[in-house]
Amino acid sequence: MESATEGISKLGINGDFASSVPNLHKNLSLLSPDQIELAKMLVEMGQSHLFSHWPESGVDDGEKKAFFDQVARLNSSYPGGLASYIKTARGLLADSKTGKNPFDGFTPSVPTGENLSYGDETFMKFEEAGVKEAQNAAFVLVAGGLGERLGYNGIKVALPRETTTGACFLQHYIENVLALQEASCKVTGGQSKRDIPFAIMTSDDTHARTMQLLESNSYFGMKPAQIKLLKQEKVACLEDNDARLALDPQNKFRIQTKPHGHGDVHALLYSSGVLEEWQRVGVRWVLFFQDTNGLLFKAIPASLGVSATKGYHVNSLSVPRKAKEAIGGIAKLTHTDGRSMVINVEYNQLDPLLRATGNPDGDVNCETGYSPFPGNINQLIMELGPYLEELKKTGGAIKEFVNPKYKDASKTAFKSSTRLECMMQDYPKTLPSSARVGFTVMDAWVAYAPVKNNPEDAAKVPKGNPYHSATSGEMAVYRANSLILRKAGVQVEDPVKQEFNGQEVEVWPRVVWKPKWGLTYADVKKKVAGSSSISLKSTLALKGRNIFIENISLDGALVVESHDEAEVKVGGSVKNKGWAIEKVDYKDTSVPEELRIRGFRFQQAEQLEKQYTEPGKFELKA
Ligand SMILES: O=c1ccn([C@@H]2O[C@H](COP(=O)(O)OP(=O)(O)O[C@H]3OC[C@@H](O)[C@H](O)[C@H]3O)[C@@H](O)[C@H]2O)c(=O)[nH]1
Ligand SMILES: [Mg+2]
């Protein structure tokens, strides 16, 4: 039998690099030339320990090959490959060990942005501009996260946004994109018939279930070709300050991996060719958003209008932020050398940064009752041209960070393996100062209501700060819709405060509508006329494009569904028992998880329900 060394020299490869790694050396003949190149890289990068337990050739050979398959994947999915990952990790781990502040030399100050006030003239002007521009937009949903803080067993985009209609987040997002597409096509006289592209970033944790959710619901009305799923890969874990890769505790022939963060979206959009394809078909704006924000699309048309009007290369949407709220702060950072940038400072970094720069109280509210720094909601709008130019230079690599949990003050050992992470909102960090980076501030009631915290943690949120729970996320939808109807002239009864799962929230009448009913404030105004009123115990669900509310007095539940070509006028006095709110305890496992994490469910006692399935003009006069 030929020796391993003879075997590989027949392949024309020099196995010398492995002479100090006997267990690898003995197995070289198993490997393909590409795998040998990877082995060489690993040895050169100080990763020989990965092979120390490898048995003789002939034992576990399948596992050894599978190990290299994984290494190849890790290598190709990271800009610059694994060697570059390890090099970056060493630098960041060294900085972390010496306690180097990532913002060293920078002083934060409060930046100025575009402040929008829902429903006023300026807002409506931006909304109109945004709807017009939407035909040139593409949307990107980052949905690769596990949602560990929420602890829900399914994927987060499958959760109902509200339980009056039960429509899930993904359905709501898709219907909004479709409504925008249609509205944009209409205002531009139908010249552009382009379907708005919609990309979703998934991960191994969410991919299959996202696909299944789409397929089992006919893509919620979108054309399958309009949706593109891009799966992010995890990155290698690190076991010490030398960035030695960690082996998977379950399988010694695998490297342990963990998520790299939502910053992967840029590299994926770039390397998949999606951005170039979008540019070819004339896309001009790329809008990024996160998995559970049931209000977001109320803010989209106006913020896109701001981007288009102001010519922003990057526009981040933000809301007033409560000190210590788990949302990043948008800050202007000015360096001692004169450079400055407007960037998100993540919630865990804002307090230390402020303390280090002459603000001994750190992250606190100012006289307005809010943090002076607007809160980042991670809704970013990029202008595609400059975005793609930048990615051609960087390959989509985003400035990373590392957050090891050390065993003790010597900072030599970790409690568990760590890894590099990156965030999508750090994209502007590599931009030249000439780049037009701006932000838009909107009220939280209209733009931000994420579902991130489980009931137990939400109940512990400091009083006055938002819960970011399934309870608050749903109640925020009713509140926003009620407030918008009020603005449009409907008398909506005042809310009451009620506690669910240990969280006190405002309960408003349960008003919901399909995106095509009220995409913009102008749409809502057009569809509401006369003098109408809605009592607190009411439920109103509008599921049709042309439903006109005129002189209605609603005290109970009303559900109207209509064909796209039907015009339905709704008025009169609707009075019935309606849908009562029943408390549910989150620990009560006899109730489905989607409901008990909210702390309530509806008892449908009585309602008026009407469906108009044909085109034509109709009147519902109760
Ligand atoms: O690896 C990942 C991690 C996360 N994600 C997605 O990214 C989104 C946000 O993830 P997280 O919930 O972990 O985000 P966080 O709450 O920690 O902070 C994020 O939202 C609030 C903002 O103020 C913060 O600045 C932003 O980082 C989710 O849609 C999630 O699915 C990925 O797609 N991949
Ligand atoms: Mg996070």
Image: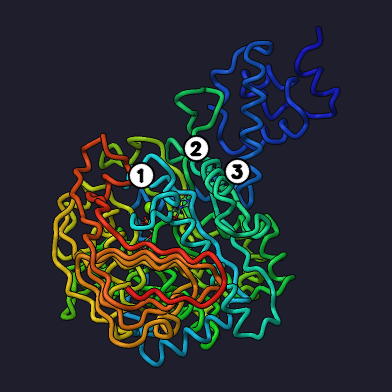
Amino acid tagged 1: Glu
Which color scheme is applied? rainbow
Residue mark closest to the camera, 2 vs 1: 1
> Which residue in the protein does label 2 denote?
257
Residue 366 sits in which quadrant?
Answer: bottom left
* Front-lying residue, 62 or 200: 200
Q: Residues within 10 Å of mark 1 (few under 14, many from 20)?
A: few
Residue that extends furthest to the bottom in the rendered view of this protein:
121
Image x and y of residue 220, in percent: 55, 56
In the visual, does 310 lie left or right of 98? right
The type of residue carrying mark 3 is Leu
Q: Nearer the viewer, mark 2 or mark 3?
A: 2
Helix, strand or loop under label 3:
helix
Q: Residue sitting at 19 percent across and 50 percent down?
A: 582
Name the residue carrying label 3: 82
Report the residue marked by disc 1: 148
In the image, residue 289 above or below residue 163: below
Which residue is depicted at the point 66% across and 64% down?
A: 275
Residue in view at x 28 percent, y 81 percent: 532
Q: CA distance from mark 2 to mark 1?
A: 16 Å
Mark-to-mark CA distance, 3 and 1: 27 Å
**Tag 1's secondary structure?**
loop
Q: Residue 225 vs residue 468: left or right?
A: right
**Is residue 212 at least partly visible in the picture?**
yes
Q: Quadrant of the C terminus?
A: bottom left
Q: CA distance from mark 2 to mark 3?
A: 13 Å
Mark 2 element type = strand
